[in-house]
Amino acid sequence: MIRLLFPNIEELKQLHYEAVKSYVADIMRKEQRKDFYQKVIDLPGFESYDKEYDFRHDTFDWLKQFVLADCSTLASWVANCPKLLKFDYMKKVYINRFSNGISKYVDRQETYNSYALFEKMNLKVCPYCEHEFLDVVEVMQGTQTKRTMEFDHFYPKGSDEYPALAMCFYNLIPSCKSCNQLKMTNPVAANPYEANIENLSYFYSNQLIGVNYTAVSETDFTIGLHTEGNMVVNQDTLGLEQRYQSLNSTACQLLKNKQNFDDDKLAEMERMGFGAVEELKRSFFGKPRSEALGTELHTKMKEDLIVSGSAFIPCPLS
């Protein structure tokens, strides 16, 4: 639905790698580390590494390459060598340390877990749906800290699926509990870290082009979601169009505002003392998407309806 594009992405990746490295170097038993190394270098892309593991001179470059493998590399491994992704060393780290409460940590220094990563991301909405907020809250009079979000595994970590990828950075998608539950038994195909994900869908109105929205009843208005490519699978699994029907009245009012308050009208209102044009735009349409993305809900829907046009025109999105 929306692209995950963190301004501090390099910092996030480095923090993640350093924590996993600390576990592998300082906590994992030597025989496990050796076996882990040998299983990783069996994967495509690791041909330059020696088959024999050298404990004394390990730079952990192999680990960094594995843990920070990009979306296309992960997809290639899953498609071409799934049987090589059954080892579960990283799945155990995820379950026992990364995602096992605020007081469990991946690294020996006890600084890094799912709570620490989510805080650094400064993300407030689910990238799969942009329909629910993500948060960490204190409950029971401040004695417990809980997440209203989860880190979804884009490629599932189940023992008969891809447990090896359980701590790969680009396989960990911050998501709402609704999307994670819906995805539990069915796949998604468009990864929010992929550059083109927002080009694979758009929201549209069920009304004809040129309609006078002032005369349109909110009960006659519905939102549609056109998808193509990998987003077709995401839509089928996550029920995105159906979930957005709760916003029909909001979307209809946005399109009424679009017609009633065009640039000329806003300029006239500014001259009459109702406020600056930019302030009026915020009042009628909300914050610009560049400000709201990642912190407010439904920014893609608003942009698609207001900026890109309202009616459905069946044509390629790319």
Image (spheres, grey):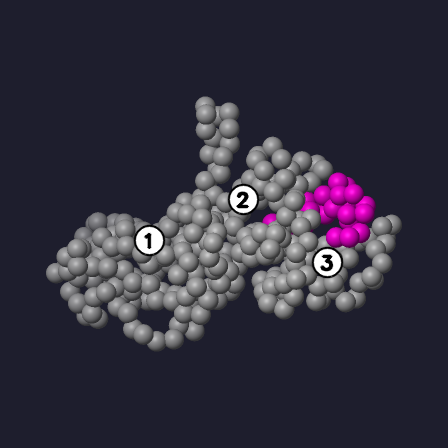
Which residue lies under the disc numbered 3? Answer: 40
How far is the residue under mark 3 from the one under mark 1? 40 Å
Give the main secondary structure, helix, strand or loop, of the magenta stretch.
Answer: helix
Residue 46 in the image: x percent, y percent?
74, 64
Magenta range is 11-36
Q: Are marks 2 and 3 in contact (CB under 8 Å)?
A: no
145 versus 50 height, above or below: above
The reply to whether residue 222 is visible in this rendering is: yes
Q: Residue at x 48, y 62 (%)?
A: 190
Q: Is residue 143 magenta?
A: no
Residue 26 in the image: x percent, y percent?
77, 41
The label shown at residue 243 is: 1
The label shown at residue 50 is: none
Which residue lies under the disc numbered 2? Answer: 118
The type of residue carrying mark 2 is: Phe
Mark 2 vs 3, N-terminal side: 3
- Along the line of sight, the residue nearer the viewer: 32 or 49: 32
Q: Is residue 315 left or right of residue 50?
A: left
- Along the line of sight, the residue nearer the viewer: 302 or 141: 141
Neighbor class of circle 1 (other Cα within 10 Å; few <14, some 14-19, many 20+) is few
Q: What secondary structure is marked by label 3?
A: helix
Dividing the picture into quadrants, the one containing residue 245 is bottom left
- Nearer mark to the viewer, of 2 and 3: 3
Where does the N terminus fall, quadrant-wise?
bottom left
The type of residue carrying mark 1 is: Arg
How far is the residue under mark 2 from the one under mark 3? 27 Å
Q: What secondary structure is marked by label 1?
A: helix
Q: Is residue 75 left or right of residue 42?
A: left
